[in-house]
Amino acid sequence: MQYGHFDDEAREYVITTPRTPYPWINYLGNEDFFSLISHTGGGYCFYRDARFRRLLRYRYNNSPTDVGGRALYIRDGDDVWTPAWMPMKSELDSFECRHGLGTTKIRGSRNGVSAEMLYLVPLGETAEVCRLTLTNESSSVKTLKVFSLVEFCLWNAWDDQTNFQRNFSIGEVEIEGSAIYHVTEYRERRNHYAVFGVNSPIAGFDTDRETFLGLYNGLHEPEAVLEGAPRNSIASGWAPIGSHCLEVELAPGESRSFVFVLGYVENPVEDKWERPGVVNKEPARALMARFSETAQLEAAVAELRDHWSSLLEISTVESPDERLNRMVNTWNPYQCMVTFNMSRSASYFESGIGRGMGFRDSNQDLLGFVHLVPERARQRIIDIASTQFADGSAYHQYQPLTKRGNNDIGSGFNDDPLWLIIGVAAYIKETGDFDILSEEVPFDNDEANTATLFEHLRRSFHFTLENLGPHGLPLIGRADWNDCLNLNCFSETPDEPYQTTANREGRTAESIFIAGQFVYTTPDYADLAEYMGFAEEATAAREHSTQMEAAILEHGWDGEWFLRAYDFFGQKVGSHECEDGQIFIEPQGFCVMAGVGVDDGRALRALDSVAERLATPYGIVLNQPAFSRYHVELGEISSYPPGYKENAGIFCHNNPWVMIAETRVGRGDRAFDYYKRIAGAYLEKISDVHRTEPYVYSQMVAGRDAVREGEAKNSWLTGTAAWNYVAIAHHILGIRPEFDGLRVSPCIGAEIQNFTVSRRCRGAVYRIRVTNSLKHDGPLLKVNGETTKGTLVPYAPAGETVDIDCET
Ligand code: BGC
Ligand code: NOJ
């Protein structure tokens, strides 16, 4: 069942009923100010950090779901309704929500009145703006009252939801004209406030929630609106809100637009006050002046559209499969931008207070983003590397506002360091900016202890080598990519977190995943070492990798697939000898991607085992059989009921590793088949089962052992976005930047017979026409009409266009 459709021309997903199976959201903002907005207007916004600088209050895990954020009420005579459907769940004559690239447009109509809200965060602004257009579609005059509503968060979102003994006494506001200022804590250490204004005179306002709603009322029954009378309340403590009341008269056929601005304003500390006790509102007035006319907002929309068009035209495909085109050209890169911006901090499943930027997550997010805005990827690499420790290990997370490593979670995730090499290599392949390797970068943000970025990579690489276990395989530490494989944890009490608890300190538990990751990383690392003039380091690295490969083949092969790990006691994890969890997806994907077993048939065998044991119609599950009981020696993985999350869920992030691995052994049909099983555009028709947004990937889809098989969770913020982009664009369509040229090596199987790709890289444009006849052993290339050998096309000078014909 579908709840809308793609509008490819407009690059929007059009939701045609408010009753979607879950709130379907969008992200507004790309720089410093971000909004989450659902198709019924729920959500919140924040400046840079969803924990410390949150403007709007939002109650996660609430019932009904998704109440809060913004609301707009219309009072038409005695009829009160909400055009976004929520919070009143008004019966509407029509409803439509269009989530586009950085814009969301929600329109509802009732009794001859239509209201359309267009939301965006304009480029360069720290504000969410909304154009409300009211149209009288009836044949008589309409006299309306419109009430806006936002509920302010008292900035620190964690405190806001917990520290009521303080919070109920600190809320403060100021009013000036049509602008409501939220100034809680400004009197002391804050030099920032929020402003909520509208470009029209108002008939009244409210800033105190209890006065506006009534103490025992929900947002669906605001007293002030139901009685048609704003109270002009001034919040003092309790819960500050912002609500304007507009009186609007519309002749038949008439339309009127209003612009609301919800902004974050920061003053220099010395300019905090206009006069003693009065907040300096100058920057807020200037902000509102930039949107006092509807035309200014429209210009901002056009600017945003152009911005996205220029980003997305960097890499495009035209194929006979429109679902493929819309994933590759629009929605997958769009999600990659969002994951790059947010890491795993704020979604409808991540509260924005728990986790900051993940070391491994952000390095992987780079992979799908780096071609879009390489300069930002560069800065991100420096930020991430600055949180690495001098011994090569790393903080698992850091806070976006301070860029400091997060002590609560600390380090000890032994895959983390290698992801830095993978991220940096991807950046250099895309840009050719080898100079980044010579940048001085601190360890643990200590400016007194710095080294070149290459030295950071060297320490990452050697961290793995210095931490090998009894089989010569890497020690897993607290966990590797799979956060829930906690082999040193041994937790018997419910109150300790799996990820940060190590009740036994051992040097026995080893990860075959990290071993595969090490072999995968080595060729790039060795090339970079050579580039830096460290030929011996390069040779030594390659030798280490050969040894690691031998260790995998000797101790990490179970007969029909790669083992997953050795536990604290040296027992196998992911072996046919195990009771549960006999086979895991991660080492099959990563070892084959690294080329392990490709020459001797083991890679094929491992991938066939994946197909036989792990593949399901909804995607490839993480392990089988699911753990049916708690295994104290394995940790969180066995805590989940069978079929969910890391316990045999379809953890979409690692599916593309198998797709890439399939292309490594030349099986494009299988790779593309797996691709289609989890890509949103192909799942649109089963939205009722899948439940999350059909335009983005979710982290997890319930696996075959689950009660709710096929149901997705944790949409948006997942490494799935970047890795699927890599799988489809680089390996299945097969166009990928390498250090010395653009590789053109499609592997998509028989279904797609012809396609073209346009790819900008290092300033040149490559137009690639693929005739996918599958007649040849490997792809045959003509570059600008000339037959060439091999599949690597040397980079052309910036400004040139290169025409490539590729026949498979
Ligand atoms: C989840 C993992 C996640 C981890 C983060 C676990 O509960 O299952 O997917 O990475 O928490 O701390
Ligand atoms: C989600 C985490 O963000 C990611 O870092 C981890 O690899 C996966 N869960 C798997 O546990």
Image (spheres, rainbow, N blue to C red):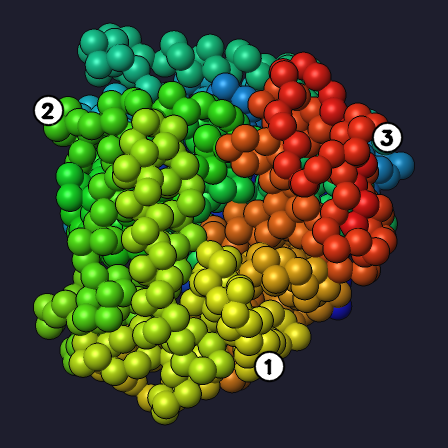
Q: Which residue occupies the extreme right position in the image?
A: 139
Of the 4 image quadrants, the one containing the N terminus is bottom right
- Can residue 381 be seen here? no
Q: Does label 2 point to a residue whose CB lies under 8 Å from ligand 2?
A: no
Residue that appears at 32% across and 74% down = 555
Q: Which residue is mark 2?
A: 448
What separation in Å lies between label 2 and label 3 (alpha carbons)? 69 Å
Q: Amino acid at mark 2?
A: Ala
Q: Which residue is mark 3?
A: 253
Q: Which residue is mark 1?
A: 612
Residue that appears at 31% across and 59% down = 547
* Residue 703 numbered mark, or none: none
Q: Amino acid at mark 3?
A: Gly
x, y percentage for residue 221?
52, 54
- Earlier residue among tags 2 and 3: 3
Q: Amino acid at mark 1?
A: Glu
747, 384: nearer the viewer: 747
